[in-house]
Image (cartoon, rainbow, N blue to C red):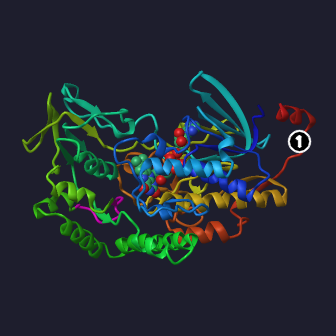
Amino acid sequence: MNQNFDVLIIGAGLSGIGAACHLAMECPGKRVAILERRNAIGGTWDLFRYPGIRSDSDMFSFGFKFRPWNELKVLADGPSIRQYVSDTARQYGIDKQIQFGLKTIAADWSSEQQCWTVTALHEASGETRTYRANFLIGATGYYNYDQGFLPHFPGEERFKGLRIHPQHWPENLDYRGKRVVVIGSGATAVTLVPAMADAAAHVTMLQRSPSYIFSVPGFDKISAVLRHVLPEKWVYGMARKRNIVIQRWLYLAARRWPERVRKILLAGVRKQLDDKSNMRHFTPSYMPWDERLCAVPDADLFKAINSGKASVVTDHIESFTETGIQLKSGQTLEADIIITATGLQIQVLGGTELRVDQQPRPVSAAMTYKGVLMQDIPNMAWIVGYTNAPWTLKADIASHYICRLLNHMDAKGLAVATPHTSERSLENETIFGSLGSGYVRRASHLLPRQGRDLPWRVLHHYERDTEMLMNQPIDDGVLEFTPARTVSPKDAVALAA
Ligand SMILES: Cc1cc2nc3c(=O)[nH]c(=O)nc-3n(C[C@H](O)[C@H](O)[C@H](O)COP(=O)(O)OP(=O)(O)OC[C@H]3O[C@@H](n4cnc5c(N)ncnc54)[C@H](O)[C@@H]3O)c2cc1C
């Protein structure tokens, strides 16, 4: 098998498949391969299997721009998203470029040979394989697939029931008639509670502190009507534009008028809750978008609480007991199943070690250039989507930028692009900026940094990023280019091997 490629992508989730589709459309001559650790396409949407798993972004803007989502359900379930990513790969012939079961462990850049040598472990056999490529794209997502975040709870070994982390959901778990406690208050917890409430005896969401939760319509009625009078392509395109604008405004308004937006969000919850005393569980101490907001479709969480099948407790854990959880307030929660929806553990580039000319280059010491390339690391991109808007909006334009860069280099006979600056990064700011979510705070020492100004500043702003990545000139004086080296006959033999 020929293991030399022009572009090597690590990861076959939304970002990796999207990048490969862009390359197929915009750089059709490139030899591209994807190395994927799992045995299936889909990344997040293949890994997570808990009841109710779904997006909390609307699918019109979470879907690829080049292959619009064409269903009317606003938040889609995990299996539908997985199917959508797989179908996209098949439609663009990307499925044939993927090599499965390979965990990338190291990537070594050689300035002399102007290429990456990537080492991957075939986990089933324990064999290592090497690949060479001129350009490397990390599409590994942002968290550790092996382990979610699991804090230590005092006495946890005493609990006689079942303990589950949503990242490793047991197949065919029967929770009918069981008392379930879900620890957490993020997107996963608010999805699990209504999804399990009908069948379980009771579901309690145990949180240390409240989050902002808002209800969105589960079904796009406007598009449903428009579909009768307009071509489908227009209808979904319009839904996408509308949702991008609404989300952007909600975010900007929250940053500009935090108190007002807070009032609106809390009023929305109050309207949904029958027992208004429950408002104390939905009134956060921070301002909207200091941490991620959670959307729930058709107020399903609030309906489960109103029905009495679910409840929320805001308290701290004193210890686990044999039969449940003892809280600091003195209250006890009896449980057959405890679900620790305590979040993700951030991991950069899926744990791949980067070296440039044999020198380790941790990305935590680098700034990102235009939020896509890495300072002083040649021919490498890491695709990281938005955290304040649907991930794919950024992943799509980042992939388009990579294609523009590659085409520019080909047209000018250039082999290497390295973003370079002598400016220092802002010590306290990672690429996730001011987002204060727990998983970001815990990992601030692992993440790439950002600078004060463009192109080292990460904007988290779709319109401005679109202009920067889609339209601004590639050659901006910051990216340093190196022409293709003349290959000696000896190297030519080595490269062909
Ligand atoms: C439960 C959950 C719900 C989410 N919901 C939303 C949402 O509604 N909206 C939103 O915008 N975002 C959401 N996100 C964030 C989500 O991860 C992204 O939206 C998106 O799916 C990321 O796609 P990706 O391809 O970049 O990464 P991933 O989906 O994480 O895929 C990365 C791929 O890379 C592979 N990989 C990783 N390391 C290696 C390695 N070393 N070697 C080989 N392969 C490797 C993985 O196996 C995986 O297939 C959610 C995240 C979670 C966990």
For the residue labelled by badge 1, is the local secondary structure a helix, a strand or a loop? loop
**Residue 286 or 364: which is nearer the viewer?**
286
Question: What secondary structure predominates along the stretch shown in magenta?
Answer: loop
Rendered view: 53 above or below 227: above
Q: In this view, does 409 lie above or below 44?
A: below
- Read off the magenta span: 284-295
Q: Residue 308 location in percent, x, y?
A: 14, 52
| Quarter of the image where one finds residue 395 | bottom right
168 left or right of 497 in image: left
**Closer to us: 455 or 68:** 68
Q: Tag 1: residue type?
A: Val
Query: How far across and how far down the image is residue 387, in percent?
Result: 44, 58
**Residue on which disc 1 sits:** 487
> Where residue 107 sits: x, y (%)?
65, 37
Q: Tell me how many marks there are.
A: 1
Q: Which residue lies furthest to the front in this view?
A: 228
